[in-house]
Image: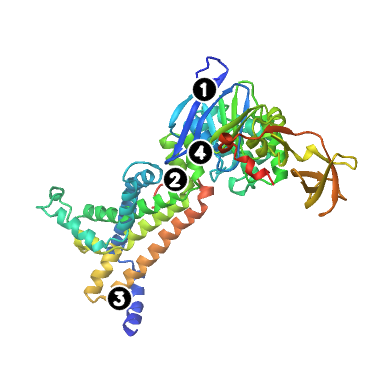
Amino acid sequence: MTAVDPDPETLVGCDQLTVRRGDREVVRDVTFELRAGEILAVLGPNGAGKSTLLDAVAGALPVAAGRVSRRGRVAVALQSPDLARRSVLANVVLALSWWGVPRSERRNRALEALRLISAEHLATRAAGTLSGGERRRVHLARTIALRPDVLMLDEPFAGLDAEVRATLLEDAVSAIRSAARATLIVVHDRAEAWALADRLLILIDGELVAAGAPRELLEQPPSPTVARFLGYDGALDDPGETLLTRPAHVALDRAGPLTARVTRAVPLEDGMRLELQLERGKLYTVAPIPSPVVGDQVRVRLLGGVRFPHPTPEAEHDQSGWTATTP
Amino acid sequence: MHLLWQSLRQSIPLILHGNPTLLSVIWFTVQVAAIATACAAVIGLPIALAIGLGRFHGRRTLQMFANASMGLPPVIVGLVLFLMFVPQGPLGAMHLNVTRRGVFLAQTVLALPYVVALTAAAIQGLPPGLISQARLLGAGRVQLSTLALREARIGVMAAIIAALGTTLSEVGAIIIVGGNVYGYDQTLASAALFEANAAHYANAVAIGIVLSGLILILMGGVGLLQHQGDGLRLRFRPAE
């Protein structure tokens, strides 16, 4: 697992990378590699250092320590989809000219990329008349058209409403994937990561806290911090260990072994999100409507969750995620 | 009011008469405006691009200098140039005082800050992602410059209009460097001053009317270009 891996499939290697912005270490000691055909998503909360990591891996920011190796040509799509005030097709053609594609091929390649991302109908539109979702689509098309060896996308779906994002995600998955290409995508929304990524890097406070297949990470988060970030919002204290749960792990059941009181109820699209107070902690679940109301006593059955031993006093500093969970 | 009215009435036949001296003054004025604006654009646009796109040391200072230079009194600029052009001066060998070339040069110097400062500001006002994205995708210096000028075209045209306006209506530097020689290097503005000083108010007003008309036509034309920029595929030739 080092950056100088001789594996010919490895297109990007990152070895103990540290990046500073001013005096601050924004990314610390990050190691990973990116292989051809793979889509790797970097997921983390706002301010975790995701974009900084991408900039440094792309070579747009100096590296303070560690090493980055890249093979092949890298195309980076910045977060803001600022297009030139020309037609959509002209914008994609322009990107191809920057990339150095011969004039005779540009138009066809631009049209093909627009088709791949289902934006062909926009080709003659002026960039200034596009909606946010359409701009993002064109922004993606112009990087896909380049057919880079490595594609790096910084929050390609930021700022879109749920519906537009869902359709763009579907189109993007098929357009981005290619056997020869390695793709690194920075996202801050978990849903985007599940939809796109073969592998996931979770970055919190500039540190790589987890790496692996999305499903594995979700089912077996390596630490309480990662678990909480992935939506493990419930916590029950047992002697020596704590059980963390996601809403899907908690079911209301008349014959359930646990007793809880409903302390909060927030309506959602598909039911009611309930906060349940137990003697040993708090759980959250989504109940169908009509659901119990605040103040009701309910019986609860647990369907899953992950257990973590209580932190030892020395380790407490690293696992600050705990303080928030204990009631 | 009475004198103004009288001068206005007398000026109309003068204009309609089409005095050949007046025609040559108009022609010279257009030449000065066109040549000086063109030279200022040729020199100023690369400087503006460097300020707007570059990351060199002293970029801010250069921009501040350009901004401040827009406010320089033309008389002072003219005086400095005149003193440099006198035979004993550092540029004395060029013999530019009281020549048409001297007038072109003085007007170029006056127009330059407008081109540099306003174009640089327009480029800096572009969406930040546009230029960085182009850079990241491998755009070279020429491609970046073309992109920046195209995208900032409304601001670039505004800079050209401002430069044109200065060169058309400025008198201070022209008089000092050019000497305001009747029938040789007078522009409409300096000729109007010449006639007014000689108490030929009807002549001065006639020239003033022609100058105002010329400014309206030239600036209006360039203004039209500015707003049709999207359709016209401008290549940023200074308007003539």
How far from the left and from the top, in percent, is residue B128? Answer: 49, 45
Chain at numbered mark 4: B
Disc 3 packing (10 Å; few <14; some 14–19; many ≥20)? many
- Residue to which mark 1 is pinned: A72
Q: Is residue B150 visible?
A: yes
Mark 4 or mark 3, which has the lower sequence index? 4
Amino acid marked by disc 1: Gly
Residue sitting at x 25%, y 71%: B195
The image's mark for residue B133 is: 4
Helix, strand or loop under label 2: helix
Q: CA distance from mark 2 to mark 3?
A: 44 Å
How far from the left and from the top, in percent, is residue B130? Answer: 51, 42
- Residue to which mark 2 is pinned: B149
Q: CA distance from mark 1 to mark 2?
A: 31 Å
> Which quadrant of the structure image shows residue B57?
top left
- Residue to which mark 3 is pinned: B202
Whether B32 is drawn above or below A10: the answer is below
Mark 2 or mark 3, which has the lower sequence index? 2
Amino acid marked by disc 3: Ala
- Say if mark 1 contacts mark 4, CB within 8 Å: no
Looking at the image, how many numbered discs can be counted on the residues?
Answer: 4
Establish whether labels 4 and 3 are both on one chain.
yes
Helix, strand or loop under label 3: helix
Quadrant of the image containing the N terminus of chain A: top right
Mark 2 or mark 4, which has the lower sequence index? 4
User: Of B58 and A282, which appears nearest the observer?
Assistant: A282
Of circles 1 and 2, the one toward us is 1
Chain at numbered mark 3: B
Amino acid marked by disc 4: Gln
Horizontal side, residue B62 vs residue A202: left or right: left
Q: CA distance from mark 1 to mark 3?
A: 76 Å
Of circles 4 and 3, the one toward us is 4
